[in-house]
Amino acid sequence: MSRAARLGAFIVVTLAILVAGVFIIGGKQYLFSSTYQLKAQFDNVVGLDSGADVRVGGVHSGTVSSIVLPHKPGEKVTVVMDLGQSTHEIIKQDSVATIETEGLLGNQYLAISFGSAGKSEVRNGDTIASEAPLEMSDLLEKTSGLLDSSQQAIQNATRATANLDSISAKINAGQGTVGALVNDKQLYNNLEQTTATMNNTMVQAQAGVTDFQENMEALKHNFFVRGYFKSRGYEDSAELAKDEIEHLPPGTPVKEFTFSAKQLFDKQDSAKLKNQKSLNAGGEFLANNEFGFAVVVAYTGMEGDTQKDLVLTEARAMVVREYLVENFGFDDSQLKTLGMGKQTNASTDASWGTVQILVYPTGTEIPPNKQTSAGGISKTASARPVD
């Protein structure tokens, strides 16, 4: 081959390489394809440069053509980008531009999110929304704060461990109460003996209380002292509130029976009945008529101790109820008691007090018993068939 031929071949090959390079560069920068332009504004572009990639869905789809600084403080930096026409169908008016970094310390590029299907398409020159980029300085500041907190936590754990070591050393050395118990066997034995003695004393005390209760029960039937219990009309004070309600129900009774306490009881301070037959009218009414429930209400006069009078009225209501239940046929669950204590509106001839039998109609709500009122239980009186 001649020299001229070789020179010609070289020129042809060089031109081919040059043309290929131009087309490759043109394809990269969209110099030879149809493009459109969009804008996004940021407070800070954190190192983004002209010519940086623009990626849509992670795919290279354009380049940053220019970055325009604001004309005055308070305005934003404008990023102008050229995008291929193929992105025009997926970038919508609600798409968002963000500045991302390749890796931790890589180059910045602009990422655009897909838009919503129902939104309109962007036009050439539109400005889309943007999100502030994550600045490395802010990330380092947060990381530094986390490291400081971790260091403080480690220091606290170290101090706590040192305190535990100190406490363990004192216990092992026999210092303090716990150390003495751990290291002094004699002190531990003495403490164990003291505990056993206290438990034995409590058992004996409980046995003594039980014996006392049994002795008191025996005294009630003793020939010499049973007169005391009989004189007051009742033996067991625990039974006083067994059928006692907290208060009278609202409404008006369908029937009332009122008796003078002096007419019914043998003494002013006693609950022992002396003229029981005076109660028969009330008992016959309960036995022969339909009713919801009834209550025996007892009062005393204004003289005497208030607390003692309250107990006395409870006892009087109880013994009247017992007489009516034992001598007349009706459902005893429908008869309640209520000791009211002193009768503030008592007349001068009622110094002993009064006893009433109040009969309420069917459907009247029965107030809760004193012994079960903590549970908040109440019930409604139901009809009773006439015996």
Image: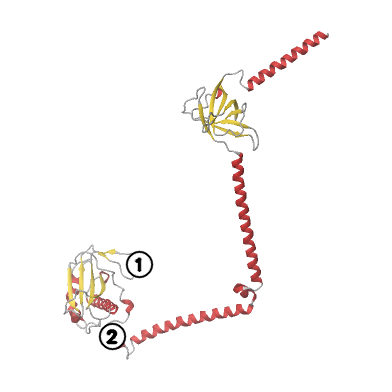
Relative depth, front residue between 132 and 202: 132
Residue type pointed to by label 2? Lys
Tell me, for residue 364, which label it has, or none.
none
Which numbered disc, 1 or 2, marks the residue closer to the eye? 1
The residue carrying mark 2 is 230
Residue at image location 62% in from the left, 47% down from the top: 144
Q: How many marks?
A: 2
Looking at marks 1 and 2 on the same chain, the residue that comes earlier in the sequence is marked by: 2
Tell which of 256 and 180 is nearer to you: 180
Q: How far apart are labels 1 and 2 at the CA level?
A: 33 Å
Helix, strand or loop at mark 2: helix
Give me the residue at 57% from left, 23% from top. Answer: 82
Which quadrant of the view contains residue 277?
Answer: bottom left
Circle 1 residue: 374
Picture quarter with the N terminus: top right
Does 93 appear above or below 233? above
Q: Position of residue 352 (x, y in %)?
A: 20, 80
- Circle 1: is it few (<14), some (14-19), or many (20+) Cα within 10 Å? few
Residue at the right extreme of this rendering: 2
Instruction: Judge whether residue 35 can be spotted in this image.
Output: yes
Q: Secondary structure at mark 1?
A: helix
Q: Decide: is 136 above or below 123.
A: below
Percent x, y for residue 18?
71, 16
Q: Where residue 147 sits in the image (x, y, percent)?
A: 62, 49
Q: Vertical placement of 201 versus 28: above or below?
A: below
Q: Quadrant of residue 206?
A: bottom left
> Given the current orientation, which residue lies at the most extreme bottom position?
224
